[in-house]
Amino acid sequence: MSTLRALARAQAVAAGVAQPVATVRHLHLATRPLVLVPLAMAGEAHAPLAALVGTAPDDARLLIVPQPRNRDQRFRFVTELAGIVLPWLDGFRGVSEAVAVDRGRDVRYRYVDAPQLWVPNPAGITFLRLLGRSTRFRRPDGDYPVHPAVPLLGRWLTFFAERAEQPGSSALLAMTDALTLHWATGQSAVEDLHLPALLGWIDPPAGWTGVAAAARAEDPGVCPPAGPATDPEFDNAALAPAMAAWAAADDDPAARDEAYAELVRLLRGQLAPTWELMWRGLGLLGALPPGARVAGRWAGDRDAFTGYAEHLDADGGPQPRRDGAVAAAVRLHRLERAATTYAVQRAYDDPLVMAEHRLTGEAFVGDVTLADPARVDDSGKRPVLRPRIQVVTTEPVRVPVGATLWSTARPGQKAKVVFVTPAADGRTEVVLELSGGMGRGLTAPPGSVPQVGERLCLTTLSEAFLPAGTFPTAEETPWTHGGPPVADVSTRSSAGLSSVVG
Amino acid sequence: MTSTAQRLAAIRGDAPPKRHNARTIAALTGNPGCSRRAVLDGAGVDKSALAERVGFPARFGQSRFAITRGNAFEAQVKADGGAELLRLVAQRLGVPVPERASWTDLGGADDLPDRRERSRAALTASGSEAALFDHPLLGLQVAGQRVHLEPDLVAARLGGRFHVVEIKSFPVIDGQADPAKVAAAAVQSAVYVLALRDLFAAEGRDPESVSHDVVLVCPRDFANQPVASLIDVRKQLLVLRRQLDRMARLDDLLTVVPTGFTADPAAEPATLAAALRTVPARYAPDCLAGCELAYFCRNEARGQTGALGRPVREALGGIAEVTEVLALATGERAADPEREEAAALLRAAARLRADALAGHPA
């Protein structure tokens, strides 16, 4: 928690309504997102109970499982869900665009759009991940055959859940995460996980304060929980009797239809309020202008979608239960790079995020007071263009001489700190030597060197390309990491649980 | 009856004291600095009823589906005199599966002294053949008071060593379970290990014969098949031991509780609320998950930075009141010298926020 964000929370308490912590939207919003509100049966190992799913506010399909302990009914639910999700996914596989790779020597294709999936909260993402885990290894043949769409949906859900781990991806998003990325409420992070309360703070009904709206939203009788866990009171007082009635009406079609209709009514009553909230949240996010680098990150999601669709086309197998040592290291490396890039990009896109870095001394804003755009350094073998500028700032400068800074206005240009001189009334003069982003000649093109009077934000955060690490192949796994994988993985799956105990 | 016990009985009112279980003790050590909670729990007050009476009912309902499933799984694992359980535990511990083991159910009768004595006798009896003990009644010294634990667990004696066996109905999928649930189970089990070791020490037996490796039995993947995992609870034991030692003695706490303090749910709500406010609480958002009175304390803590979470409070320089944070940030109020550093940071943060929100170039 940065001080800036903490202060926004304090301001939200005083104002009675959530305060912005971003000036632009840091995620992509699809034109045709699929919103999915799942409910799970309490106590069971991720047995689906119901879901409301659709791509428009007035197009909600309700799927229910009258008896979630029944395996056949659970897989019927998954088949129905696949019947909605898979055609929606195929709808994005129409138009491709060519992307130059390998410095223009080759070309590859990616779809011009990609699917985006929304769930209410992080627990919803976990639910989809485990639903994917429980279905992707199923087979349409053999002892317990399932519909062929079931394992396919499982693989796609696993794909989405893995994308959701990647910072900056907009493939599968939790509404509470998306909202808290842009607004700070006057309640704690734990309470922010409750979507009705969070939206109560951000967008209270007319005449209500955020705190009153959030308090009202905590009553499960008024605002049912946003899933996947159900309200225990609802389970005990409404759902259990309705399920019992459905089970008891086993051989009476009329009574069974009636009991089924009652279950539908009850479950829709629990899901519909969250459905409304999801679309209200999307509306709030849509009102923010997108950040400049959002489209670039979405292109990464389109790449991933294209790649996985091709993998499945080529009869690719399901994702493994667990990564091997090399695959795990590669994944970790990829996630770390994505996290770094995402943090830098958000700061470059959004002055309010950059302000957090200015507060910690990783960036400062100053005015250019002197500029020598024609300065040439001829001390080396060849003369090179090395303009110098002087920036005066009122902010504390916590970078040492010799450090390299970047300006948000010219991300391709390096600025090396040459002198840092404290001046009168708390100001600091910083002399910087520029390189890059000025062409190859000895004269800088107009606009490539900051002019006197220009205001610059200089930061240690770099947008420079992060090279990918090199990793051995799986067959070359070093002995420190268990050596090359053995064929029988089942012998290794018995590790203790202690690794997950905090 | 000692004076402390009389005092606690007066606080509690007419009702019999609520019994502790490992969960309440684990939660108690989760917020050891909260005097309100220490006094109420020490007195065995029915906090659910109390919270409801003062208008802030707790929301700790349990779904009947979850209870049914939990009971069914436990019954399944304990079936056949624990034969399946014995096999699972022995295999996980890497010892040969015994031919047979005795099964002693120490639960049942509600007569406390008798049950305690039966548990003590059965658990400390000499003998090293394989044995399983269900529902033992254990005791633990908490804040100077002896509390009884009614664990829903099995103590397994295998190869002369005791292991605590905890049966939980959350699934272990591909060797991984919900970390929060595993952590909670580990702390609970550590309470039982501690209580068992105390019992052994009191009988002059070696407390170390109770292993710090706890066996957790959960359903595997998406089916009902049980799987056993080992959890090393040494860390949890250290934390628990330290916090139980540190926990202010109830006698000392009671000296600052006003005479006439009552938490009897039968009293008038206004009286109760006023009385509760005389005993300081230390609210944190974590309380919502563990304490029945949390909503009352949260309401009382409105306007405190601590109610927003400890990281927020720390990021705001440890300043307790939201109004003071904002006054320092706008410069309305001058900071005293020891807060000057925090105030300067807040002023800078407020200026940066205002600039960025006003759309100034950055």
Image (cartoon, coloured by chain):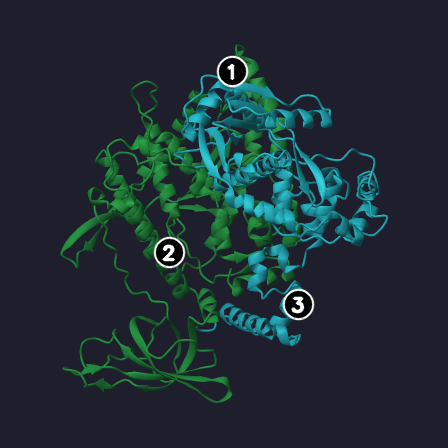
Chain colours: A green, B cyan
Q: CA distance from mark 2 to mark 1?
A: 52 Å
Up/down of A323 relative to A138, above or below: below
Mark 3 Cα within 10 Å, few/some/many (few <14, many 20+)? some
Type of the residue with mark 1 = Asp
User: In the drawing, does residue A41 fall left or right of residue B42?
Assistant: left
Closer to the camera in the image, B210 or A453: B210
Structural distance between the alpha carbons of marks 2 and 3: 35 Å
Q: Is residue A399 above or below residue A421?
A: above
Residue A476 place in picture, x, y as percent = 20, 45
- Chain at numbered mark 1: B
As helix, strand or loop, the secondary structure at mark 1 comes to helix
Which of the 4 image quadrants contains residue A89?
Answer: top left
Percent position (x, y) of residue A119?
46, 42
Q: What residue does disc 2 label?
A: A339
Q: Earlier in the sequence, mark 1 or mark 3?
A: 1
Q: Is residue A370 above or below residue B247?
A: below
| Chain of the residue on which disc 2 is drawn | A
Element assignment for label 2: helix
Q: Which residue is mark 1?
A: B80
Residue most toward the top? A251
Q: Quadrant of residue A477?
A: top left
Q: Amino acid at mark 3?
A: Glu
**Tag 2: amino acid:** Ala
Q: Which residue is mark 3?
A: B324
Who's the residue at 41% across and 31% down the image?
A81
Q: Which residue lies at the image location 54% right of the left edge and 11% below the top edge?
A: A252
Circles 2, 3 touching at the beta carbon (< 8 Å) = no
At which x and y percent is residue B228? 45, 29
